[in-house]
Image (tube, rainbow, N blue to C red):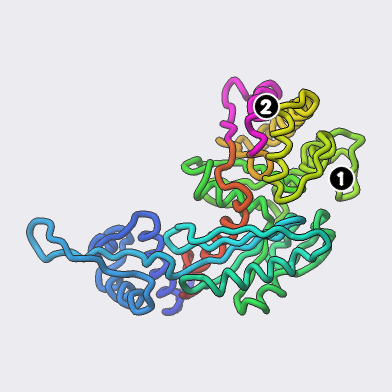
Amino acid sequence: MPPAAPDQLRRANTALVLRTLRDHGPGSRSALARRTGLAKATVGAIVGELAEHAVVVEGEASSQGRGRPSTPVGLVAGSVLGLGLEVNVDYVAAALVDLAGSRVRTTTREVPQGDDALDVLEGLALDVRREAPGRIVGAHLAVPGLVERDHATVRLAPNLGGTDTRPGDRLAASLGLPVQVDNDANLAAVAEATHGAARGTASSLYITGTVGIGGGIVQDGRLVRGSGFAGEVGHMPVGQPDRRCACGRLGCWEATVGLRPTLAAVDVAGEGTPMERAAQVAERASTDPAAADVLRSLATDLGRGLAALCTVLDPETVVLGGYFQPLAPWILDDADATLADRLPSADAHRPTLRVGELGIEAAALGAAEQALADVLSGVAAL
C-alpha cells in the first residue's frame, strides 16, 4: 500500500484528535498524545491549528505534582456543526449537532395540506442555517424511502409519491452546502444508538413508525446496509393479506401496523405530526374499549413482525420509535409477549424491547451526526 499523502495524513491525525476529545473529553497535549499514540509535537501542531479556527479552546493550567502545569484542551461547544434534515409526508424536521455530540437545536414544522414538503423543509433549513451559532460543515437529509448507495438518488419513496428523485441537490443549491441523502430509519437508528435508548448496546434494531414503517440495523456502531436497501421492513409480507400498501402490494407489514390503518381503525383523523396523532389514539383508547382492542391487535401484529426480524438479525436491543412511542403503554407488553412466544431462541436469548427516547426528531438527529462523519473520520478537512 502506498504511503498516505501529507494532506491525507494530516486530516487523519486531526480526526483522531477530534474523536478522542469527543469520546473522552478534554485533556492536556500529553494526555492526547497518550490517547492517540501520536507524537506530542504532532498533537501540539494539530491543537494549535484547531485553536486558530476556534474548534478547540485551552482551559486554565493546573499543577498535578511535579513538573510543569498542564493545560487541558477541549472542544468549543457549537463551533463546528452538522445539519440534519428530514422530509416526510406531513412534517419536516431539522437538527444541529456539534463535534462533541451535543444537540444544539432540534425543531419540527408541520406541512400544511396541499403544500410541497420539500418547499417547507427548504424554508426551515434556511432559517436554521441563518440562526446557527457556529459553522455548518455538511448536511444530511433523511427520507422515508429507498436510497441508492450514491447517497443522492431516492429510488422509491411511495409515501412521498416520488421515484428516482434527487432532493438533496435542490437543498444543496439553496444552502450552499453538500447534502447527502439516506433512509430515515437508518438515520434514526444511528441517533438512538448514539443519544437514545440503544446507547451502550453492541447491536440494535430500530423500528420507526411515521406514515410508513422502516427499520435500521446498527452493529458495533455501524449501520448494516446490505446492498444498499437493508431495513425496508415495512414491506415485509407479514401483514394482513387483504390490506393494500402505498407501494401497491397486498399484505405489507406497514399496511397493518402503520399509522394510516391505525388512525382509520379507531376513526381518528387528527392533525399534526405522527406523534401528536398517535397521542390522540392513545387518549381515545383510554375511554373507548373498541380503540383499546385495536391497539391490542396492533401489538400482536407488531410482535409477529419483530419475531421474524429478530430470528434473522438476533439484535441485543429492539427500539420502537416514531408513532409507537405515545402508544407504548398500550402496545409494549403485548408486543413483547408475542415476540417471546414466536421467537425460536427466546429461551436462550430474547432481545430487550425498549421505547425510543428521541421522538419525532430522531431521524434529523441521526442525519446531523452523519453530516459530521466525514470530518470525524478524516475524509474531509475542517
- Neighbor class of circle 1 (other Cα within 10 Å; few <14, some 14-19, many 20+) is many
Quadrant of res 215: top right
Is residue 170 rendered to the left or right of residue 129?
Answer: right
Tell me which residue sits at (82%, 37%) in the image: 256
Q: Amino acid at mark 1?
A: Cys
Which residue in the protein does label 1 denote?
245
Q: Is residue 336 magenta?
A: yes
Residue 83 lies, with reference to residue 206, above or below; the image says below
Q: Which residue is mark 2?
A: 339
Q: Nearer the viewer, residue 218 or 371?
A: 371
Residue 64 locus on image (x, y percent): 12, 57
Q: Which residues are magenta?
A: 326-354
| Residue 58 falls within the magenta-colored stretch | no
Across and down, in percent, residue 362 comes to 60, 51
| Residue nearest the observer in this picture, 303 or 268 | 268
Of tags 1 and 2, the one toward the viewer is 1
